[in-house]
Image: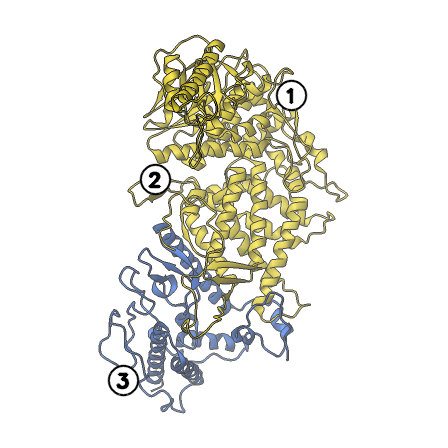
Chain colours: A yellow, B blue
Amino acid sequence: MLTREEAPSPGYSGKRRLDCVICVEMPQVRRLHQKHVMQVACALEAVVLRIFGPEGGQVLFTRENGHVMLSRSGTRILTALRLDHPLARMMVECVWKHSGQTGDGSKSFILLLASLLRTIYATGSKELNVSRVYNSREAAESASARRLADQTVAFALEELEDLIAVAVAPYGFSLSAKTLTASTQSASHSDRVHVEKLIASFFHTRLGFAHSDFMGELIFKLLLNWSCKNDKSSSSDNSRSFQGNLYVDSNGCQADSASLSLRFLNDNFHALHTPVSGFPVSSSRLIEGQVIHRDFATHDQDSRQDPVKAVVLTVSLQPKWLNASDTMEIGNGTHRKSIVHFSAWAECSLEHIFATLQALGVSVLLSAVKQSDAVLTLATQAQIRVVECIGEDELALFLHLSGASAVSDCWGIKPEHIASLTFCRSILLGAHRYVHVAFSDSREQQPCNIIICGLGEGQTDQYAGAVQDVIHMLRTTWEPQGIATKAPSSISPGCVIPAGGIFELLLHRALLQHGHSHAISKHTPVVRQVLADAILHLPRHVHSGNERHFLQIQSKVWSLPDRNPFQPDGLFCKPGFSQAHCGNKSSQGEAEQSMYCSLFNNNKTVSELESVSCKYHLILAVLHCVKNLLRLDAVLHTPTQLHPKSLQLTYSSEDED
Amino acid sequence: MQWPREEGDVTSSPRSSSNMSLNGEEEDLEWEPPTEAEMKVIQARRERQDQISKVMGEYLLKGYKMLAECCDVCGNILMQDRARRNYCVSCQELDSDVDKDNPALNAQAALSQVRERRLAAHSPAPSDPAHVNGDAGGAVPQPRPEHCEGAAAGGRAVAPAPSAPAPPTPPAAVATSPAPCRATPASAASLPATAPPVLRVAEEAVLSKMRWASGQLQSCASLESSIQLCQLISSCAASLRSLREISQ
C-alpha cells in the first residue's frame, strides 16, 4: 500500500519544452523503514509527554495577528503541529477521528500508539517466520510486525471486550443512566456525585484543576434538565421524534432516554450553547429557554410579558419579482397598467400578509433570510418584531421545541405555523445582544441553554469544545451497542472505573492471566503479551513524576481479589454470567463499590473516574491505526496536491505551498 | 542465487540485500540473544534515538516543520524552521553515532570489539590495553540551527584534510583549527611489524574506511556529503596517526 505526499518542486528533467513532446515524470519513491515509523511516532510521543498527566504543561499558541491561546487539548495541539511527513499526518488524522467520536483520549492515543509500535517491533524481530524467504532481515522483520499487528487486532475485536467486561469492569461500577432522567427521589445521591465526578475528571484532564468541579456540576444540571424534558415528552400526542422511553435505532439496539438526550445535545450543541468572552469561567450558567444568536432587526419598543406568538419564515415576505436579466412586461393588454400600479399592488399584497399576521396575533417573526426594508418598515408599523438571518440549526431547534412548522409560502400562514412563547426579549450577554425565548408548554421542565464564559475568546472556545467533548464521552459511556460487531456490548453501559491507570493495570493483569490459563483461544500468547506490555506504559507515564506512587497503585491492583474469568475446567466465563456481579444498584453492587473505594481511596470518596467503554474504544482505534501504519511500504512523492487538507487546523499558518 | 521478491517491494537497493549473507540464511533469520557489546550498542542506539525523538518533539512545539525527507547522511527525518532551512537533529545537534560505535572510525570501539571476540573464544586477553585517543573521530556538539545552515556548516573541530581533492569549504563554515595538519599518506606507510595484532586490525579497518570514503568522494555530487566525506577522511588520518604513535 502506498501513500502519497507532495514534493516541493516538480522533478522535471532539464529538457526544454521545445525539444521534447513527451516529458515523462517518474514519481520519486522512497521505502518506508521501521526506523522512520518509530521516529515519527516517538517525536509525536515526545510532544504529548510534555502535556500529559497531572503534571503536564500547556502549549502557548501564537498567531501572526498576535492572538495567543493556552491549551492542553491533545487534538488541538497535534493538529496545530506543522507536519509534512505522511505518517505523521496519518497518525494525527487517526487521533482526530477518534476524539471526534469519543471526545477524549487524544494524548493517550499517541502514547499507546508509540508503545504498541515499540512492542510489536521488538517482538516481531524475535518471531521471524523462517518459512518464507525475504530480501533482507529488515523485510522479514517488517512482515513479522505486520502479521503480529493483524493478530493483535483480531484478538482485540474478538476477545478483548469480553475480557474487559469480565476481568476489569467488575472493579469499577455502573452508573445508571436513570441518574440523569429520574426525579430527585429515585436517583441515589452517590450516583449523582459519581456522574458529576466523571464529568469533573474529564475537565480536569482537559483544562486543568481549576473550575473542573464547577463545570462538572453545571454539565450535570444541563443533562438532568434535558433528560427530564425528554423523559416527559414521550406522551402520545407529541409530534416530536421521541417515541417513548425506549428507542430502537438503526442497529436494532435499544437506547434509553438518557442516551437519546445525549445524542440530542450532541447534534444540537451549536444551538444549545452560547459562548461569552470577557467573564470568568465561574460566571457560566444555565438559562431557561433558547437563546437565538441574533438581535432584533426592528426596534424593540416594549418587551411584553404576555404570551407571545411567533412565526418562523424560511422565505422573504416580499418575494423578489425580478432577478437579474429578467424582463417583466407591464401594460400589455387593455388595462394599460404602469410600474406604479405594479409597485402599489406589491405593497398591497405585503400589507395583506401583515394584516393576516396581526389577525392571528403574531408579534414576532423569526426569519432564516434577510427581509427587505419594506417588510421591516411594515413590521415596525404593525408592532411586530423581526429577527433575521437565523441559522438553520437554531431554527430547526426552535421548531422542534415549539412544535410549530415553518412558513414556506407567505400566502398560506396557518395556525399550525404559530409557536407560543412565554416571552421573547433581548438579552445582553457580554458584548452581544441576543434574543431570548421561552416556550410556554405545559411541561414542568423547560429547555435550557448553557452560557459558557471565558476570559478570552480562546479560553471560551476551549471550554465550549470541552463541553461538547464531554457529551461525546458520556455518549460513548452509555451507548449500549458495541462498535465492532454492532451487537449489544458486553461491557455494561455506564461502567466507570477510578482514573490514574487502574484500568490499564487491571487489563495488563487480566491479559497475562488469560495467557497463562488453559483457556482455549486461537490467539497465541504472544499477542496477549504484546498488548499487555504496551498497555503498561500508560500508567507509567501518568505517574512518571512519582514512581513510588505508581508502584503503590500497582501493588494494590495486584493484591485485589483474583477474579479469574476462567472456571476451573478452563472454559472462558462468558460475560452473561458475571453481569450479575457488576456494580448496579443492587446491594451487592453497593458492597463492591465500597470495596473498591476502600482499596483505592481511604476516604471512601471517589477521586477521579473514567469511562471503561471509552478506554476500550481507544485501544481498538489505536490497534487499527497501527495495523494501517504497518501496512505502508513506500512513500510516493507527487508534484501536485492530490487531496485537500482534511483537517481544520486552527492555529497553523498555511502560508507556504 | 536468486532471491524471490517480497510483495510490495517497490525498489531494491543493493545495500539491503548485502545485509543478508549468502551462506546460511536460516542462521540470520533465527533470533539469537545479543552479546554484551551488541547490547551496549543497541542500548546506546536506543538512547540516542530517544534523544533524537525528544529533541524533534521540542522543535515541533517550537513551530518547526517535520518534513517528508530524510537526511542523506544519517537517514533521520529532517526538520525545517520558519525560514525554510532544513535541519537534521542528529547531524547538527547530537554527537555522531557512527563515530562512537563504529569500530572502523573509533579505535576504542574496535579494541573493545576485539576484546569481546577474544573473551568469547576463551583466548587470553592482550596484556597491555592500548590506550588510543578515542576522540579522533568524535565530533563536538554542533551549534544550534539558528547559527548555521546545512549539515556541514556547523564547524566540526576537525581540521580539513588538504591531501584529498576537497571542494572549497563554504564560507559559513567555522574553522576551529585553522592550521592545516599534514596528512600522512595513508596507503604508503604502515605499522611496524612488532605492532600488536589489535592495532593492525584497527589500522586495516581505518584504511578500508578511508578507501571507501575516497571512492565515495570522487563520485559524490552533493556539497554537504563531500564535506562530510572529507571530514571522515581527516578523522581516519588522525586515527591512523594515533595508532602509529602508540605502536612506536
**Where in the figure is residue A534, as x and y percent of width and height?**
55, 50
**What residue did someone put label 2 on?**
A69
**Where in the figure is residue A267, as x and y percent of width and height?**
53, 31
Residue A208 seen in render = no
Q: Residue furthest top?
A: A306
| Amino acid beneath label 1 | Gly
| Amino acid beneath label 3 | Arg
* Comparing labels 3 and 2, the label whose residue is closer to the camera: 2
Q: Are marks 3 and 2 in contact (CB under 8 Å)?
A: no
**What residue did someone put label 1 on?**
A244
Alpha-carbon span between mark 3 and mark 2? 58 Å
Which mark, residue A283?
none
| Amino acid beneath label 2 | Met
Which mark, residue B182?
3
Q: Residue furthest right?
A: A569
Q: Residue furthest left?
A: B178
**Where in the figure is residue A28, as x and y percent of width and height?**
48, 67
Alpha-carbon span between mark 2 and mark 1? 44 Å
Is residue B63 left or right of A155 when viewed as pictured? left
Subunit bearing disc 1: A
* Comparing labels 3 and 1, the label whose residue is closer to the camera: 1
**Residue at point 48% right, 49% down?**
A92
Alpha-carbon span between mark 3 and mark 1? 93 Å
**Where in the figure is residue B130, as x and y percent of width and height?**
38, 79
Is residue B68 left or right of B188 when viewed as pictured? right
How crowded pointer 1 is (Cα within 10 Å; few <14, some 14-19, many 20+) is rated as some
How crowded pointer 2 is (Cα within 10 Å; few <14, some 14-19, many 20+) is rated as some
With respect to residue A335, does B57 lie above or below?
below
Mark closer to the chain start, 2 or 1: 2
A38 vs A634, nearest the viewer: A634
